[in-house]
Image: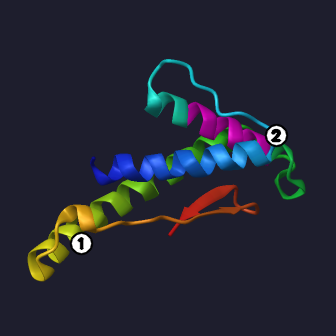
């Protein structure tokens, strides 16, 4: 599985947990996993925006910005992972399946963005 897909699945797991903690459910539409992850992410960002004192006056367009920023970060980490994994496999004679990359997600309620590390 490509790293971007793996990282998107990690975000989905985090998102599902956060939605549950917020009293919301992860909804499956049948339009495919990518569409569901985006739709549920936008719903989560909307919930965060409407429940934060710091974000009073911020409109829903900011939810789309949060999604685009998250997606860009996941793509950038996936590119780094592809290069880094290749280097590790060739230098340390590891199998690619032996390498596991786990991401952390942190929501910044002042900027309404999820940071990935």
For the residue labelled by badge 1, is the local secondary structure a helix, a strand or a loop?
A: helix
Q: Residue furthest top?
A: 30
Residue that appears at 70% across and 49% down: 18
Q: Main secondary structure of the magenta part?
A: helix
Is 19 situated left or right of 72 in this image? right
Q: Is residue 12 above or below residue 116?
A: above
How many numbered circles are shown? Answer: 2
For the residue labelled by badge 2, is the local secondary structure a helix, a strand or a loop?
A: loop
Q: Quadrant of residue 82?
A: bottom left
Name the spot of residue 32 as percent of width and height, x first. Answer: 44, 24
Residue that appears at 72% across and 37% down: 60
Instruction: Give the color scheme: rainbow, by chain, secondary structure or one colour.
Output: rainbow
Name the spot of residue 99 as percent of width and height, x first. Answer: 29, 68
Q: Which residues are magenta?
A: 38-48
Q: Quadrant of residue 108?
A: bottom right
Q: Label 1, on which residue? A: 84
């Amino acid at each position: 599985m490509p790293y971007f897909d793996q990282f998107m699945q990690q975000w989905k797991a985090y998102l599902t947990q956060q939605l549950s903690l917020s009293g919301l459910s992860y909804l499956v539409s049948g339009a495919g996993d990518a569409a569901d992850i985006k739709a549920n992410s936008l719903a989560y960002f909307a919930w965060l925006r409407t429940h934060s004192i710091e974000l009073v006056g911020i409109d829903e367009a900011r939810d789309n910005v949060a999604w685009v920023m998250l997606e860009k970060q996941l793509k950038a980490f996936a590119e780094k992972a592809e290069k880094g994994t290749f280097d590790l496999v060739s230098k340390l004679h590891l199998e690619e399946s032996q390498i596991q990359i786990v991401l952390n997600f942190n929501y910044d309620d002042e900027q309404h963005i999820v940071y990935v590390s």
